[in-house]
């Protein structure tokens, strides 16, 4: 059981949501959104690369300082600043072969096996408010999820 997970923000910027992301977030393709990229380090070992997309309509005033002030713990930030409470998530998990920037960020070689977790987080009224893609190096850690 992992006691502590450190998170490090890689970058944050405004984007136009592509058709795939827009469909999951139930907004129009090309809608304004946000992209957050970060690295998670369970027990200090950087082993999860994440890309998080948010609909602009729910997080219009988000700023990088808000993310860093919350140590990249996004759900607490959503609730305390934007009054958006995550009530449930749906995940799809798939084994993939890693390549490019993802493995570079994790200090791995192209072809490394990764676990890809695609998560949609919902608030009340079944409204999706976050699309998260996590790429997990499970060499030393297993994927475990508990959201209450």
Image: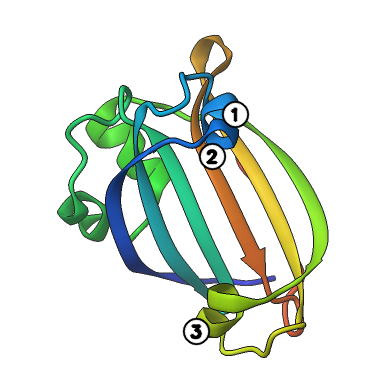
Q: Is residue 136 left or right of residue 83?
A: right
Query: In the rendered image, which residue does mark 1 sit on?
Result: 24
Element under disc 2: strand
The answer to whether residue 87 is seen in the rendering is: no
| Viewer-nearest of discs 3 and 1 | 1
Query: Residue at 59% of width from left, 77% of height from top?
Result: 100
Give the crowd class for mark 3: few <14, some 14-19, many >=20 residues within 10 Å. Answer: few
Q: Which mark is residue 44?
A: 3
Q: Could you tell me residue 128's position as x and y percent?
A: 53, 24
Query: Residue at 72% of width from left, 59% of height from top?
Result: 116
- Residue nearest the observer in this picture, 51 or 147: 51
Element under disc 3: loop
Give the crowd class for mark 1: few <14, some 14-19, many >=20 residues within 10 Å. Answer: some
| Viewer-nearest of discs 2 and 3 | 2
Q: Which mark is residue 131?
A: 2
N-terminal label among 3 and 1: 1
């Amino acid at each position: 059981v992992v006691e502590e997970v450190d998170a490090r923000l890689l970058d944050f910027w405004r984007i136009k949501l592509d058709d795939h992301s827009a469909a999951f977030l139930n907004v129009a393709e090309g809608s304004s959104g946000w992209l957050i990229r970060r690295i998670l380090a369970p027990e200090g070992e950087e082993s999860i690369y994440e890309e998080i997309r948010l609909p602009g309509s729910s997080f219009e005033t988000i700023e990088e300082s808000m993310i860093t002030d919350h140590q990249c713990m996004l759900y607490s930030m959503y609730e305390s600043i934007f009054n958006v409470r995550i009530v449930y998530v749906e995940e799809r998990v798939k084994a993939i072969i890693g390549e490019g920037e993802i493995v570079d960020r994790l200090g791995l070689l192209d072809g490394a096996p990764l676990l890809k977790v695609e998560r949609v987080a919902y608030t009340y009224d079944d409204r999706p408010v976050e699309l998260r893609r996590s790429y997990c190096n499970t060499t030393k850690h297993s994927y475990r999820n508990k959201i209450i």
